[in-house]
Image (cartoon, rainbow, N blue to C red):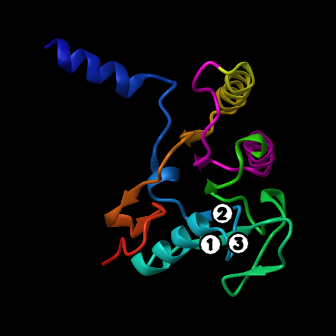
Amino acid sequence: MQDQVARDQIAFDSSFRSPLPVLNPASIAIVGASERARWATQIFQNLRAFGYPGKLYPVNPRLAQVWGSPCFPDLASLPEPPQHAMVIVPAQAVQGVIETGIKAGLESATIYASQIGEGEDPQIVARGTALKAVIEASGLRVCGPNCMGAIALREDISVIPTPNCAS
């Protein structure tokens, strides 16, 4: 009985945010896209190999094209708000990417960078505290930081930076 009450409380908890933008997004932006960036390239290749049916938007302010597709300078420059962003940039740049994404209508993100909130280094802890405040204030759904990605087989999504995930 007590377990049922707990499940009911979760079902009606107003802070619950649907995981659908993370696990079944209609569009994904890959921030930090570059043919030289191993993780970003592997994630792009895995999404293609899995047959991801949604729109993919490479994002990098230094490139006009990557992986045979137009590359956008930031999340605000995309033709539509992305439902999910794969944030593959250094820790110092993550908060700016997330803030830009929130303003552009981003619903969810996976943050791969470490050195955001963990450990005892005051600068790293402060970076994590600041990012957490931005995320909580916006309602953005986030996996990470220091995340290794996810696989949603039914939705044809693999955003793990590992080769040959589809085989």
Question: Secondary structure beneath disc 1?
Answer: strand
Give me the residue at 69% from left, 33% from top: 138
According to the image, label 2 marks what residue?
29
Residue 80, relative to residue 118: is it above or below?
below
- Amino acid at the residue labelled 1: Leu
Q: Sequence order check: which comes first, mark 1 or mark 2?
A: 2
Q: Sequence order check: which comes first, mark 3 or mark 1?
A: 3
Magenta-colored span: 94-120
Q: Is residue 161 left or right of residue 58?
A: left
Residue 163 appears in which quarter of the rendering?
A: bottom left
| Other residues around mark 1 within 10 Å, as few (<14) / some (14–19) / many (≥20) | some
Q: Residue 53, percent across and down?
A: 49, 76
According to the image, label 1 marks what residue?
56
Mark 3–mark 1 Cα distance, whole angstroms, equals 14 Å
Give me the residue at 83% from left, 57% from top: 76
40 part of magenta stretch: no
Residue 47, relative to residue 110: is it above or below?
below
Question: Secondary structure beneath disc 2?
Answer: strand
Q: Is residue 161 left or right of residue 4?
A: right
According to the image, label 3 marks what residue?
34
Q: Residue 16, percent across and down?
A: 47, 30
Q: Is residue 30 left or right of residue 163?
A: right
Contact (Cβ within 8 Å) of mark 3 with mark 1: no
- Amino acid at the residue labelled 3: Ser
Residue 165 appears in which quarter of the rendering?
A: bottom left
108 part of magenta stretch: yes
Residue farthest toward the top in the current orientation of the protein: 2
Question: Secondary structure beneath disc 3?
Answer: loop
Q: Nearer the viewer, mark 3 or mark 1?
A: 3
